[in-house]
Amino acid sequence: MAKRKKRDFYFFGFGNMAQAIYQRIDKEAFGDIYIFEKSNEIKEELHKARGVSNKNENFKLSPNTIIVKDQEYFYVSNFDIFLLAVKPSDIEALCKTQLTKEFFDMDKQPFIISIAAGVTTRSLDEYLGDYGAGKLIRAMPNLCAKKGLAMTGLYGEPYYFEGGTSSEGKLISEIFKSIGKVLWVDKESDLDSVTAISGSGPAYIYFIMNAMIETAEELGIEKSVAQKLVAQTIVGAGETGKNIDNLKNEIIKVSSKGGTTEKAINIFKQKKLDTIIKQAVKAAHKRSKELSR
């Protein structure tokens, strides 16, 4: 029996998230990797990356990576992967003008993954026409991808991907495990919750970190030292906190009667910080639903 060729990987758009995925996937696991990018600035950087003196880790290209210069005809297989990584406002034009029989073999249906926030599989199916057929996946990674610490929410038609347990689901999971952890959701609407919690979440933590760093500076600590103190505290609390079932009890344990922690926690309670955070996350969730189309 002839050995099946390795699947090819097509990047449509090569911004920060696509670059993070490219940088961390096992590029030897694929046949050819194609990059379609309209930005002249990014394309210029990509071509520089071909030079022997290139030192930019973000643009270190593997030998099997092809920067697509002009539209030409591509023969795809049912096992190939298309990653749609353009802005949500550009997704319809991409699907209707580039992913067509004029440029690709329409008899084949590759896996199509979209990381365009708010664009539903229903809209993708409509935009893609013959390309849909149940092989559509939506992914919601976050900014921590560049350090391999992302949390990515995934959704694909349950009958096809079986919540990530089918062979196809495992294939998609492996791509996003390269940039962190993955979570398959049962309903596409759950991605709005994922967006509000982990998609936007890094910004919430950065907001808190910034306030702590500024306070440390006001107390006389140098900014560079304050950044290290705050960052490691956040990392440590996150790492230990993920295995604590009852965080409220843990807060009580570390808040000694009449001590410093108790004093700070009491201010949080007086100002209803927990209510503010809940309201903020729910506002993000509402907005995510409004943007879904």
Image (tube, grey):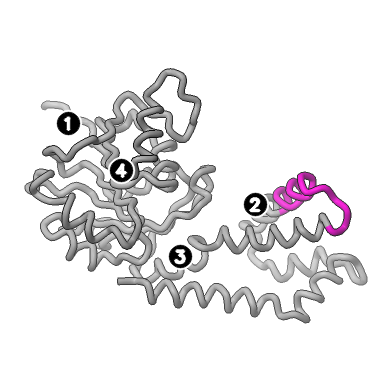
Q: Which residue is mark 2?
A: 239
Local packing at callout 4 (Cα closer than 10 Å; few below 14, some 14-19, many 20+) is many
Residue positioned 61% across, 57% down in the render: 242
Q: Which residue is mark 1?
A: 4
Of mark 1 and mark 2, the one earlier in the sequence is 1
Question: Which one is in front in this view, the residue at disc 3 or the one at disc 1?
Answer: 3
The majority secondary structure of the magenta stretch comes to helix
| Farthest residue, direction front | 40
Question: For this view, does 52 lie left or right of residue 77?
Answer: right
Q: Is residue 185 above or below residue 94?
A: below
Question: Which one is in front in this view, the residue at disc 3 or the one at disc 4?
Answer: 4
Local packing at callout 2 (Cα closer than 10 Å; few below 14, some 14-19, many 20+) is few
Cα distance between the residues tagged 2 and 4 = 37 Å
Tell me the SS state at disc 4.
Answer: loop
Residue type, label 4: Glu
Local packing at callout 3 (Cα closer than 10 Å; few below 14, some 14-19, many 20+) is many
Q: Which segment did they paint magenta?
A: 218-233
**x then y, percent, for residue 257:** 90, 71
Q: Which residue is mark 4?
A: 37
Cα distance between the residues tagged 3 and 2 = 21 Å
**Can you tell which quarter of the image residue 120 is in?**
bottom left
Question: Which one is in front in this view, the residue at disc 2 or the one at disc 4?
Answer: 4
Tell me the SS state at disc 3.
Answer: helix
**Can you tell which quarter of the image residue 126 is in?**
bottom left
Where is the N terminus found, in terms of image quarters? top left
Question: For this view, does 291 lie left or right of residue 197?
Answer: left
Q: Which residue is mark 3?
A: 195
Front in this rendered view, residue 206 or 42? 42
Of mark 2 and mark 4, the one earlier in the sequence is 4
Residue type, label 2: Glu
Of mark 1 and mark 4, the one earlier in the sequence is 1
